[in-house]
Amino acid sequence: MTSLPARVMDLDSKGVIRPGMDADLVVFDPAFITDTATYDRPRQHPRGVQHVIVNGEFVVKDSETTSATPGDVIRA
């Protein structure tokens, strides 16, 4: 799901989970995930996302956002 698009875009450190790669992961329970955004409040976080890891650092841990901002802009 992610390795093919990463290869097509020449993003060699993305798309697979392996030592030395950029770890971008989302951990969620599909039975409990719920979109909470509305047209009036579009920036609401969804319910049911336990963890989000970007470049190996937690940006959401135990359903709470952290202050970490490890991501980079990827330009084609």
Image (spheres, helix red, strand yellow):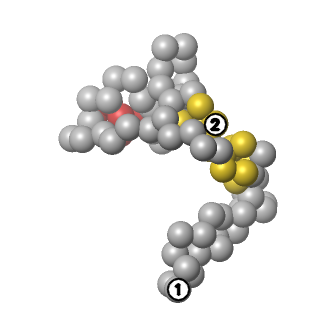
Q: Which mark is residue 40?
A: 1
What SS does tag 1 mark?
loop
Residue 66 image position (x, y, % from top left): 65, 44
Which picture quadrant has residue 3? top left
Q: Which mark is residue 58?
A: 2
Query: Relative to the observer, which residue lies in front, 37 or 34?
Result: 37
Q: Residue furthest front?
A: 67
Q: Which mark is residue 54?
A: none
Residue 69 image position (x, y, % from top left): 50, 40
Of the image marks 2 and 1, the number of the one nearer the N terminus:
1
50 horizontally vs 69: left or right: right
Residue 74 image position (x, y, % from top left): 31, 40
Residue drawn at point x = 65 percent, y = 64 percent: 46
Residue drawn at point x = 72 percent, y = 42 percent: 61
Q: Is residue 29 visible?
A: yes
Residue drawn at point x = 21 percent, y = 41 percent: 76
Query: Relative to the observer, which residue lies in front, 73 or 21?
Result: 73
Query: Relative to the observer, which residue lies in front, 65 or 25?
Result: 65
Q: Is residue 25 visible?
A: no
Q: Residue furthest top?
A: 19
Marks 2/1: CA–CA distance? 28 Å
